[in-house]
Image: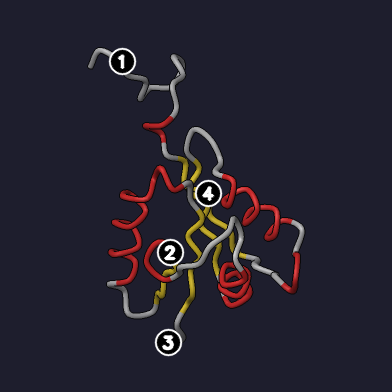
Amino acid sequence: MEEMKLFLCYNFKDDYFVRLVSYYLGKQKTLKPYIWTVDGSADGDYPPQINAALEESDVFLLFLGKKLGKTQEKEVKAVINKENGIDIKKRILVRLWWTWKHESCPCYLEDSL
């Protein structure tokens, strides 16, 4: 079976959780996750390595927390606008429910807990 490359797009505030997800995805023989804090390193908001990783990816996983990070926003726009040859057709949204504070949500917790 062919390897599937996954680009994990997330706010750096959610790094710990996304690293765990990446670890377990990477245990699957056919999945190869790309996570910036593990696989990349460079200066600047949007280094060319990110674009290269997006171009090579088969799946775009967006981890949506309370707020998009600056780099995360650029990654999302690049995918949506198909910038620089990026054409990822498989997109998955992972909503990080614990970062949202909304009383109508069944997972709403008070600050005092």
Q: First in sequence: mark 4 or mark 2?
A: 2
Q: CA distance from mark 3 to mark 1?
A: 47 Å
In the rendered structure, the answer to whether residue 48 lies left or right of residue 94 reads right
Viewer-nearest residue: 2 or 73 = 73
Report helix, strand or loop for mark 2. loop
Foreground label between 4 and 2: 2
Q: Earlier in the sequence, mark 3 or mark 1?
A: 3
The mark nearer the N terminus, 3 or 2, is: 3
Question: What element does badge 4 sit on?
Answer: strand
Report which residue position mark 1 lands on. Answer: 111
Judged left or right of residue 105, residue 58 is right
Q: Position of residue 76 (x, y in %)?
A: 64, 53
Quarter-of-image position of residue 51: bottom right
Q: Is residue 5 above or below residue 106?
A: below
Quarter of the N terminus within the rendering: bottom left
Q: Nearer the viewer, residue 54 or 5?
A: 54
C-alpha gap between disc 3 and disc 4: 25 Å
Under tag 3, what secondary structure? loop
Q: Amino acid at mark 2?
A: Ile
Q: Quadrant of residue 83?
A: bottom right
Question: Which residue, given by chain and number where applicable, does mark 4 sit on?
Answer: 93
